[in-house]
Amino acid sequence: MKLDLNIRKTIGDFKLNMEFSSEADKIGILGASGSGKSMTLRCIAGIETPDSGVITLDGRTLFDSSKKINVKPQDREIGYLFQNYALFPAMTVKENIRCGIRDKDRKTDSEVNTYIEQFDLKGLEGRYPHELSGGQQQRVALARIMAGKPKLVLLDEPFSALDSYLKDKIRKQTVTALEESGISIIIVSHDKDDLLSLSDEIFIIHEGEVVTDPKTEEAAQLMGFSELNEGDKMEFTHFDSEGNARIVDVSQKEVTHRVAEAAGIIKVSQEIMDAILGKKLKKGDVFTVAQIAGIMAVKKTPELIPLCHSLAITNVEVKFEVNEERSEIEARCKVETDGKTGVEMEAMTGVSTALLTIYDMCKAIDKGMIISDVRLIMKSGGKSGLYEEGPK
C-alpha cells in the first residue's frame, strides 16, 4: 500500500494538520484522546471533508481540494471499524454480514457462512447485536467489513471497550484474520500494545500534527514506537559455539510462545540521580524517553545485530529500578513473541539502548557514568526450554 496524506481541517479551536507518507501495509497512529486520530481516519474514509489538502491511495486520488476531487465514501473501497462497531440492531449476525457484501451475486448463504466460519461466529448466526458480547460484536463488525472486500480497513480504537483478558484474545484473532485476508490497515489507538500487535509503521500525533522527534515530551508521554517487522523466515543464520555462521532450517519448528528478559545497570553520580528523580532535565522525563528508546530498539535488532532476523513481537516492557544507596539504576526489558525462534537478542538490545539513552540524556552533567552487567536473566519457550539466571 502507498498512502500519501497532506490535509488540514479546523473545527472550532482544534486544527488538524496531518502530513505523512507510508508504504507500509499496516499503519499505526498513536495519540492521546483529542489529538486528531479519529478525525484523520474519517477524512481518509470520506466521512469528513478536509478544508484543504490531498489524499492519495496507491496512486488513486481520493481527495484534492485544488482539483475539486472528493470521491464518495462508498466508492473509496475502504472499510471502517467504528469504536462502537455500528452494527444494525434490528438485524441478526447473518443479516449484518450479508449487508457488507456489495456484489449482489455474492449475497448467498454460502458466501456469508465463509465469513461466519473465518471469524468464529458459528452458532451465533441468528443472534442480534444486543445478545452478543463485546468481542463477538467486534468479530461481526470485522466480518461485515471483510465481506465487502475493501482494499483498506480503518480501525478506530478497536479494542478500547474490551477488558484486558478479552483484549489480548481479540487482538490475536484480528491479527490472524487480517493476515489471512491480506488487506492493508490503518489503526488508531492511545494504547501502544494495540499498535505493537498490528502495525508495521507507527506515527505519533499530538494536537493534530505528526510528532517527528521521538524524544519530545509528547512522544515520551505516549510511549510510542517506530515500525515493526513481522513474518517468519523459512531459515535463518546463527553463530555456533565456535563463532562460525550456520544456517538453521526452522520450517518444521513448532510455533510457541517465547519470552526473554534482560537486565543491565548504569552507575551515576549523585548529581545525576538528583536530576533524574527530580525531573530537572529539560529534555523530558529520562525514564520515559529511555523506555521509548528501548522499545524502538527491540524492533531495530535485525538491523543492528549481524545475522539476527525479524520477528512478530507481541509485547515489549521496559522498566527501571533505582538504588539510591548505590547510585545505580537497573533497566529491565521483557520481550514476547509467538513464533519459531527466541527473542533473547531483542531483550538484550532493548535494555542496552535504554541504558545508553540515560547516558545520552545525562552526559552534559557528568560523562563518568558506567554501564555494566548487561545480561539475559530469563528465557522460555523453544527447544532449549526455560533458562533463569541463578543467584549471584
Image (cartoon, rainbow, N blue to C red):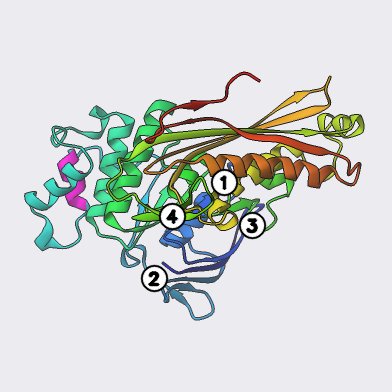
Residue at the spot x=35%, y=46% of the render? 175
Determine whether the residue tagged by mark 3 lies in a helix, strand or loop: strand
**Residue at x 87% of width, y 34% of height:** 272
- The answer for how far apart the CA atoms under marks 2 and 1 are is 40 Å
The label nearer to you, 2 versus 1, is 1
Of the residues under marks 4 and 1, which one precedes in the sequence? 4
Q: Which residue is mark 4?
A: 246
| Amino acid under disc 1 | Val
Image disc number at residue 298: 1
Q: Which mark is residue 251?
A: none
Q: Determine which residue is flagged by label 2.
A: 71
Q: Mark 3 — residue? A: 209
Residue 105 lies within the magenta run: no
Instruction: Please tell me whether mark 1 sits on a helix, a strand or a loop.
Output: helix
Q: Quadrant of residue 278?
A: top right
Instruction: Assess disc 2: are there few (<14), some (14-19) or many (≥20) residues with their C-alpha within 10 Å of its C-alpha.
Output: some
Question: Which callout, 3 or 4, points to the residue nearer the camera?
Answer: 4
Query: Alpha-carbon neighbours of circle 1 within 10 Å: few (<14), some, or many (≥20)?
Result: many
Q: Earlier in the sequence, mark 2 or mark 1?
A: 2
Is 81 or 113 nearer to us in this picture?
113
